[in-house]
Image (tube, grey):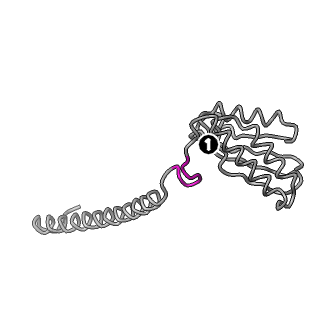
Amino acid sequence: MVNILPPDSLNAARRFCWSRVITAGSLVAIVCGIIVLLALVSAYAIAGGIPAGTASFPESTLPLSYEEDQADLIRAEAVLKELAPLASTSSAVKFITAALLVRPPGVLVQNIRLTRGNPMTLILSGAAASRDDINMYRSALSKDANFKSVSVPIGILAGTKDNRFTITLTGDF
């Protein structure tokens, strides 16, 4: 095959084609860069909006001594005695009290949820000084005849959750 274009025209045509390829490639690269930038900015905005570790529990400090734990427990018992006539089912208050009485020192219960049904579910959540305290609390609750089952997620017993715990108790309250 014979080229009918003179060499100068052929070089000009090649430069024109290469300039179009380079222009099209750079436009594609710019569009991809803008898409990646928008994805990164949105991910940064989402991650920066919620501080890590504070979404589910407020910050709290554990009592420094067993005496402070006992004083808190006595105050809680007094409040429970005062509120017992107002409770719709006094048996639920009795089981909450039973769950709080076996709490070892160093365990702080921050949240109590009661779900009515058959069987009823009592969920205790909070913080502890160590995972051994959580395990002692679980075993003390397991020995109590008031509760049919006591369950703690395995990740909490393994110590992966910053010594925060959730214990689910079921029974006929």
Q: For the N terminus, which image quadrant? A: bottom left
* Principal secondary structure, stretch drawn in magenta: loop
Residue where numbered disc 1 is placed:
127
- Judging depth in this view, the residue of 39 and 6 nearest the camera is 39
The x and y percentages for residue 74 are: 72, 44
As rendered, which of 150 and 160 lies closer to the eye? Answer: 150
Vertical placement of residue 143 versus 58, above or below: above
User: Is residue 95 a member of the stretch shown in magenta?
Assistant: no
Q: Residue at x 40, y 59 (%)?
A: 40
x 17%, y 68%: residue:
4
Residue 137 or residue 21, whichever sits in front:
137
Q: Is residue 13 left or right of residue 80?
A: left
Taking 11 as reference, is 111 above or below it?
Answer: above
Tag 1: amino acid: Ala
Specify whether 73 is left or right of 130: right
The spot of residue 81 in percent (x, y) is: 80, 52
Judge by depth and name the residue closer to the eye, 64 or 56.
64
Viewed as shown, does residue 80 lie left or right of 25?
right
Please state if 98 lies on the left or on the right of 48 as rendered: right
User: Mark 1 Cα within 10 Å, few/some/many (few <14, many 20+)?
Assistant: many
Q: Residue at x 82, y 62 (%)?
A: 86
SS assignment at label 1: strand
Residue drawn at (72%, 52%), measured in percent from left and top? 112
Percent coordinates x, y for residue 6 in the rendering: 11, 67
Which residues, given as a range, are shown in magenta?
Answer: 53-60
